Amino acid sequence: MIPNPELIQYACIARSTTILAQHQSEKEASMESLAAQCVAQAPPNHSMFSHTVDNRSFTFLIDPPFVFFTISHHTLLKSQTLPFLHRLRSSFRQTLPSNHHFAPLSFQPHFHSIFTHALRFDPHAPPPPLPSPPQPQPQPQPHFLKKKKTSTLDVLADDVVSLKPLHHHHKPKHVWKKHVWVLLLLDLFVCTVLFVIWLWVCSGFKCMTY
C-alpha cells in the first residue's frame, strides 16, 4: 500500500502518446503539460524505468501499446511505486471493455475506482467493476401497434401468405426449363439445315473420298 496517497502527485494511463485517464493531486499545480512530454518521451525498449530529478520521481511501466506513468515525491520508494503501477495495469486490463475507443481521456470515468483500488490494494479483493451503463427505458407502444387477439381466420390467412413465396420460387425454375428446351430445339434445327447444305454442296458423300 502507498503510505500517503498525496505522495503520488500525478498518475496516468496512456496508449502511445494518447492519455486515456489521469489523476492529479490537489496540492500540486497543473501537470498535464509535463506529463504529456514525459509520456511522449517514454524510453523505448524498456518495460520499467524510473528517474529522479530534484524532489520528483518519474516512473514508467511500459506494456506496449500502453504506458502507465507516475510523478511522485522523491520520498516514495521505487519498491512502492512499481507495485502500484503493476496493480494499476492489472485492474485496467481486467476492466477495459473490448469495444473501447481509445480517444483522449476516454477511460477517465472508470479511472477513480481503479486508482483507489491500486492505492489500497487487497490481494483477496476482486478488481473494481465497471459502472453499469444506463439501461434504456421501454417506450410505451402506440395503441395502433398493440397486439391484436389472434383468431383462427388470422392464422389461416398467415398460412396462405407464407405459402405464396413457395409458389413464386418454383415458377422461375419452370420458365428456365422451358427456355432450355427452346434453345436445344433451335440448335437441332440449325444443325439439320447445315447438314443438308453440306450434302447438297458435296453431292452426297463424294467429299469423303478426297
Image (cartoon, grey):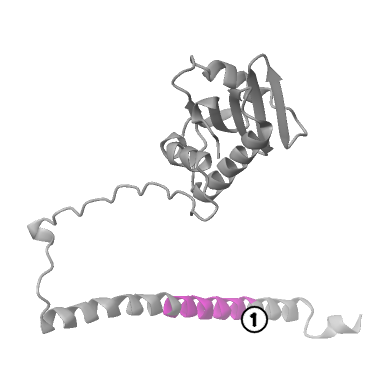
Quickly name the residue at label 1: 192
Q: Residue at x 23, y 80 (%)?
A: 160
Above or below, 46 against 41 in this view is: below
Q: How many marks?
A: 1
Depth check: 134 or 131 in front?
A: 131
Q: Main secondary structure of the magenta part?
A: helix
Whether the magenta-drawn stretch holds residue 180 is answered as: yes
Above or below, 196 against 85 in this view is: below
SS for callout 1: helix
Q: Residue at x 86, y 83 (%)?
A: 208
| Image location (x, y in percent) of residue 52 | 69, 20
Depth check: 171 or 40 in front?
A: 40
Q: Residue at x 62, y 34 (%)?
A: 81
Whether residue 180 is visible = yes
Whether the magenta-drawn stretch holds residue 49 is answered as: no
| Image location (x, y in percent) of residue 145 | 13, 60
